[in-house]
Amino acid sequence: MCLRTTIAPHQVWGACATAGYGLAAAVARLAAPPWRLASAAVAAVGAVLVPLVFLVADGARQLEVAVVERSGGLLLDSGTPYVPDPAQLPDYNPYLPGMALFGLPRAVLGDVPLGDARLWFALVSLGAMGLAAVVCGSAEPSSCGTGPNRSPARALLWLAATPAVALPLAVGGVDLPVIALMCLALALVGRGGPVAAGLALGAAASLKWTAWPLLPVGLALLAVTAGRRAAVRAGVTAVALALLAVLPVALADPRAFTEHVLLFPLGEGGTGSPATSPLPGHLLATHVPGGFALAVAALVLSAVAVAWSLVTRPPRTTVAAADRLALGLGVAMCLIPATRFGYVVYPLVLLGWFRLGPVGRRRPVGRVAEAHRTRLCTTKPLED
């Protein structure tokens, strides 16, 4: 079976990425040893920088980018990023109010390249991922990554060169900033700073619903590594920031907020959602009588199972927390009635990022580290 996209920015990315990855393979073949940093740099330039510059200069944008840029203008004009009475697909904005901030440059600067939301998506995504690597690397200086990429810059370059990440970086995928803030939040949680971790958790939660499963996972890790008081402080900070971003907009027009942010993502809005990838939840909702209720019930059961695992076996390292979150999100994205294959970038990045650079194979932190040191000190030495 041959799959071919009909989205023009994706076609541009495919042409550029084909050339970029081909040149990267040639560089890797000629290098000794192969797959050094030069090949990753060539791949990142060909698959991210070239198509991004071309698309920004050309002005072609996919629907998500246009929706976010319009929401920034609406937020400035009316105090809400949502069209009051959406009548067709382009009218819908399924994102939480924080996402409209990426549309503010276009609303303020006008139709200039610097106002393009894609640039800000990419800058925030790479900046947050890089900061996550720095935070984790400084938390335990003597521990390095498991692979060849031992610096944040190298890890970031390899991440950007990965096709699943390069595509949204180039065309302006809205999920990548969410994932990047989720990774930053986990890194700060692993370091044990409740206020900074809470701010990152709240920032991610104000962008999209897909970030909300991060809250229980991150707080469970923080409770183990820094104590329950730290977890409560982080939780209060995160929820307060998220409510500060969401509640005023929701109260300004509750009907529009419900239609855009709650009903439309579930496929129950006035216009059908374009998220129709043939995954189990969508197939149930579409082809089975009462399938929507079955899919939602399965989604709730999976959430309960993950929550139970957090209580009985909470994660004790950043990597373990990222793995638990990736598992929960992967299952949820298969079961939600309105879903798409592109959401696979969430579990892929969460599973890979904390193993890619100086953030992998970390020693336990906080109370776990203290208990580990206590065990070492109290262990009876071997006799000669």
Image (cartoon, grey):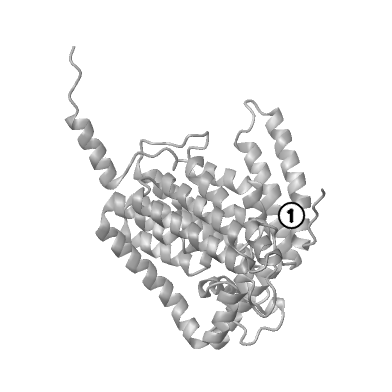
Q: Position of residue 113 (x, y in %)?
A: 67, 68
| 374 to 339, vertically: above or below | above
Residue 124 visible in the current orientation: no
Residue pointed to by mark 1? 13
Image quadrant where residue 266 sits: bottom right
Image quadrant where residue 220 sits: bottom left
Q: Position of residue 322 (x, y in %)?
A: 46, 49
At x 37%, y 63%, the residue is 198
In the displayed structure image, the side of residue 209 where residue 106 appears, left or right: right
Residue 374 visible in the current orientation: yes
| 247 to 290, vertically: above or below | below
Amino acid at dot 1: Trp
> In which quadrant of the rendered image does the C terminus lie?
top left
| 138 to 37, vertically: above or below | below
In the displayed structure image, the side of residue 60 where residue 39 appears, left or right: left
Q: Position of residue 111 (x, y in %)?
A: 68, 75
